[in-house]
Amino acid sequence: MTRTVIAQGTFDILHPGHVHYLEEAAAMGDELYVIVARSTNVDHKKAPICPATQRRDVVAALESVDEAVLGHETDIFVPIEEIGPDVIALGHDQHHDESRIDTELERRGIDCEIVRAGAREPASGDELFSTRLIVDRILERRGE
Ligand SMILES: Cc1cc2nc3c(=O)[nH]c(=O)nc-3n(C[C@H](O)[C@H](O)[C@H](O)COP(=O)(O)O)c2cc1C
Ligand SMILES: Nc1ncnc2c1ncn2[C@@H]1O[C@H](COP(=O)(O)OP(=O)(O)OP(=O)(O)O)[C@@H](O)[C@H]1O
């Protein structure tokens, strides 16, 4: 019986933190689907720089990822219903409330575990494991 895992996020400018999260998510099952957030749904921080199609394509190229899909425009549970995962892997710092997701999964009759992944060990030297920090450094170095 194949154990299907779903991971999700913005994945704007890919970095080792993303790779770590997706490798951890992949290790939770046999196949990993990644839902890439639509730019319009990223409302809890600055909008992504790269379009969703580009962000999906880069995530899809990662070895740990079996399939990357564009998220639904308005109902984030549609891809969950379509894929029917055994596990939803949340990122170590993702703002989602597990109990709220759990309640909605139950309401929709979706039987699926929610597991939070761990953080990548802190960056060493001048490595940046955060899209926001990468953008900040670009602005700083390019003199904006
Ligand atoms: C269970 C689940 C399903 C999601 N499905 C979608 C979706 O269908 N469409 C979408 O645009 N975003 C989807 N998202 C992503 C959220 O919209 C949110 O933007 C994303 O979690 C951003 O997290 P980040 O700040 O870690 O990048 C989903 C998130 C979760 C937890
Ligand atoms: N350093 C990290 N260690 C482990 N997981 C990470 C790390 N950075 C991001 N992730 C995970 O990758 C997923 C997508 O995160 P997101 O696209 O928001 O990247 P981000 O670098 O955290 O963005 P930002 O820095 O702009 O908030 C989330 O589940 C997040 O928890």
Image (cartoon, rainbow, N blue to C red):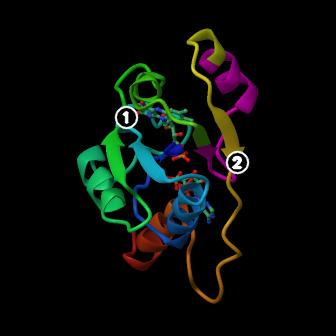
95 and 89: which is toward the camera:
89
Q: Quadrant of residue 107?
A: top right
Residue 96 lies in the magenta stretch: yes
Mark number, residue 89: none
Is 125 above or below relative to 11? below
Q: Looking at the image, is mark 1 or mark 2 earlier in the sequence?
A: 1
Residue tagged by mark 1?
71
What type is the residue that disc 1 sits on? Gly
Picture quarter with the C terminus = bottom left
Residue 21 lies in the magenta stretch: no
Is 99 above or below relative to 11? above
Q: Which residues are magenta?
A: 89-105
Q: Is residue 50 among what the camera can see?
A: no
- Residue 38, how many percent across, how many down? 36, 36
Q: Is residue 93 among what the camera can see?
A: yes
Secondary element type, mark 2: strand
97 left or right of 72 in image: right
Write the residue at 69% across / 44% down. Answer: 115
Q: Residue furthest bottom?
A: 125
Mark 1 beta carbon near ligand 1 (under 8 Å): yes
Residue tagged by mark 2?
116
- Residue 15, how many percent across, how many down? 47, 70
Write the residue at 57% across / 37% down. Answer: 86
Task: Rate crowding at label 2 as few (under 14), some (14 to 19) or many (20 or more) other CA atoms within 10 Å.
Answer: some
Write the residue at 63% across / 51% down. Answer: 91
